[in-house]
Image (cartoon, rainbow, N blue to C red):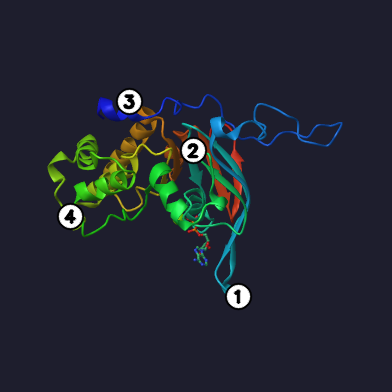
Amino acid sequence: MSETLQSAAPAIWSKARHHPYERAPLDPERGEPVKSMNDISRDPSTADVIALRGVNLSLGRGAARVHILRNIDVNIGRGEAVSLLGPSGSGKSTLLMVMTGLERPDSGSVMVAGEQLQDLDEDQLARFRGRNVGIVFQAFHLIPTMTALENVAVPLELAGARDAIERARRELAAVGLAARIHHYPAELSGGEQQRVAVARALAPNPAIVVADEPTGNLDEATGSEVIELLFRGHSERGTTLVLVTHDTALAARCDRVLQMRSGWLEHRVGAIETP
Ligand code: ADP
Ligand code: MG
């Protein structure tokens, strides 16, 4: 990655030194949570880049209505890498949608990068996403009518960068695609498309990058290249990474593992068993 991009990342995105979420034990005298380093009442704007409180979300109508997210509380610190494990249908993708402002919860509060998302209208949410969020999907989701270069330049242009094309070119070189910049998605392999998607997600130096089973459509070797690029973006730029995966070995590389079960979020502490 170029020097310019590294220096463009604000110094505040330094690696988190502690894991900010644990449920405080109850104070035996007063029956209230004990105040601690992990207490959520501390200044959230400096410690946490994501804080969800009491988030509930149901989707679908009538008998098909599903309570997808159940009373989710979670804090993620600036610069953390967090993995999200859970069976298919447990609500992982929906939780990422809420964290990125693509889905509004029925109740609860969602703070990301200092913004209370429930206070923003759709235009403000779109601007918020452009500035703060990079998303990598399982199915790549590149714009088919644009070249790799144009795909990566889009979020930079939306963020008002004057040198969007030049930066996009550097970002594509950083993911090993200097020779493919004028190719359309249909002319690229799955692994190449996902590398474009990673470049697009990282290019604006967003506060958070979420990746939803980013290797799910790739073979193992290609998938690990994509994962290395995501972790490199995380460590070099201090980008907070939220990674949905079924791979427990991969999850264990993250600072912390969260587990979804039927819409509930469990916080796992300590090492997880690897296969
Ligand atoms: P995961 O990513 O863990 O596989 P999802 O967040 O995609 O889970 O979905 C969680 C549950 O919500 C699933 O049971 C899914 O069928 C349901 N679901 C997702 N989107 C909708 C929708 N638009 N309407 C109704 N149910 C939905
Ligand atoms: Mg999913």
> Can you tell which of label 3 and label 1 is closer to the viewer?
3
The image position of residue 121, as x and y in percent, is: 50, 56
Q: Secondary structure at mark 2?
A: strand
Q: How many marks?
A: 4
Q: Residue at position x 54%, y 57% from top?
A: 104
The image position of residue 75, as x and y in percent, is: 58, 39
Please name the amino acid that badge 3 sits on: Ser
Give the residue pinned by disc 4.
184
Give the residue pinned by disc 2.
82
Please name the amino acid that badge 2 sits on: Val
Circles 3, 1 touching at the beta carbon (< 8 Å): no
Q: Earlier in the sequence, mark 2 or mark 4?
A: 2
Ligand 1 under 8 Å from disc 2 Cβ? no
Query: In this picture, is 103 found above or below 268?
Result: below
Q: Residues within 10 Å of mark 3 (few under 14, many from 20)?
A: few
Q: Residue at position x 46%, y 39% from top?
A: 251
Q: Earlier in the sequence, mark 3 or mark 1?
A: 3
Give the residue pinned by disc 3.
7
- In this picture, residue 92 sits left or right of residue 187: right
Closer-to-camera residue (232/11): 11
What is the spatial separation of the Cα atoms under label 3 and label 2, in whole angstroms?
Answer: 24 Å
Please name the amino acid that badge 1 sits on: Ala
